[in-house]
Image: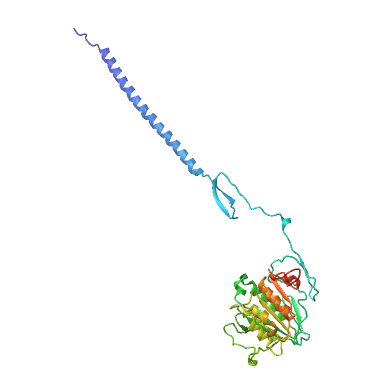
Amino acid sequence: MQEPISLDDVELEAKEAAAKEEFLRLQKQGKLVSALTTTIVHAVIVLVLWCIIVALGPDEIPQIVALTETKDDTYQIEKQDFARSVKRKPQPPKSASRVQTITSVATSPVSVPSIEDPVIDPLGIGTDFGRGFGQGKGNGEGGGGTSSFFGGTAKGNRVVFVVDFSQSMIRDGGGVRLQMLKKELISSISKLPKGMSFQVIYYSTSPWLGGESLYESPTRFADKPEDRIPWSEATKEGIARAVNHIKAAKPEGATIWKEPLELAFAMRPVPAVVWLLSDGEAQDAEEVVEKIKKINSSRIPINTIGLEVPGAAFSYLVDIARQTGGKASIVHKGKLYSGPAALRFADDFDPAGGF
């Protein structure tokens, strides 16, 4: 016979079931809270780390550039990490630099300084004129007038400036030669004393006068009296007109010496002094040197000036000056040399025996 279930047992079982159910409920709630807490903590950590990264920025490693010199003296750029190597081309000691000093021993009415290797000063030219190659024996009836050009001086009441206005005057040297020539030519003409006669013959492929140009000038023949170039007088008006022409003149064409020289010596009365300036070797240089005594039958001194033309071109100018009793000078790197100091710039000069 089954024992009857007491009321106490029923209540006890009910309480146990309720307790078990409550325990399970609390256990489940605890897991949810724990999971939620972990999630929040992780989210906070991630947020903090993200803020730090944004604030500091990415960590970059810089690249260091090294210069290394190759055998052909050029530099190559190499990218390296965490290293730098710079090699410089060794420089000679300052004491090794050589300064060559040249002193002209020739007497001159112009003070002749000792000259060191020149400092470029294109528009502030110094003077170093010696005696040249002797006294002219021409019949130009020089008189008491004096002209000067690129530091040199010459006596004579009638002077002709035969100046190179070829394209190379602006093509080579960035136009400095042209500026130098115009400055000196204007200065020379402006200083001519009253009573002197002068003329400027511009030349390149052919000659022309002030106010003309290479392609807008009449063809002149030295042996025709009607083509003879007239003299200008060194009056205020005559000088001003010549200066304006010099300022407006433009270089064109090549370099030819014979025609302008022939026209200069065909002038009447004949010149007392001729200045010939060139910045290059003329196409007819050899012919002019061979025939200069015929071209200059009056034996007028020709003072020659080479404008930045050391070598063969200057040798021809030296020869012309020597044959006519004139002076040869050269502007080299912005410095003027003349007489013995200038001869070293000719390609066939022998320091022991001259030319």
Asked where in the image residue 320 lies, by quadrant, the reply is bottom right
Above or below: residue 183 compared with residue 299: above
Q: Residue at x 30, y 20 (%)?
A: 18
Q: Residue at x 70, y 77 (%)?
A: 319
Does residue 328 appear left or right of residue 70 in this picture?
A: right
Specify the farthest residue to the top: 1
Q: How many marks?
A: 0
Residue 177 in view, yes or no = yes
Q: Can you give x and y, in whole percent of width and height, for residue 329 in the image?
A: 72, 74
On screen, 123 above or below 237? above
Q: Residue furthest bottom?
A: 226
Q: Residue at x 67, y 85 (%)?
A: 264
Quadrant in the picture for the C terminus: bottom right
Q: Identify the image quadrant of residue 287.
A: bottom right
Q: Tell me residue 344's x, y (percent).
A: 72, 69
Decide if residue 187 is in sight here.
Answer: no
Image quadrant assignment for residue 313: bottom right
- Seen at 45% across and 36% down, the residue is 45
**Which colour assignment does the render follow?**
rainbow
> Where's residue 64, x and y in %?
56, 47
The N terminus: image quadrant: top left
Q: Position of residue 343 (x, y in %)?
A: 73, 71
As rendered, which of 107 and 294 lies closer to the eye? 294
The residue lying toward the viewer, choosing from 120 and 102, is 102
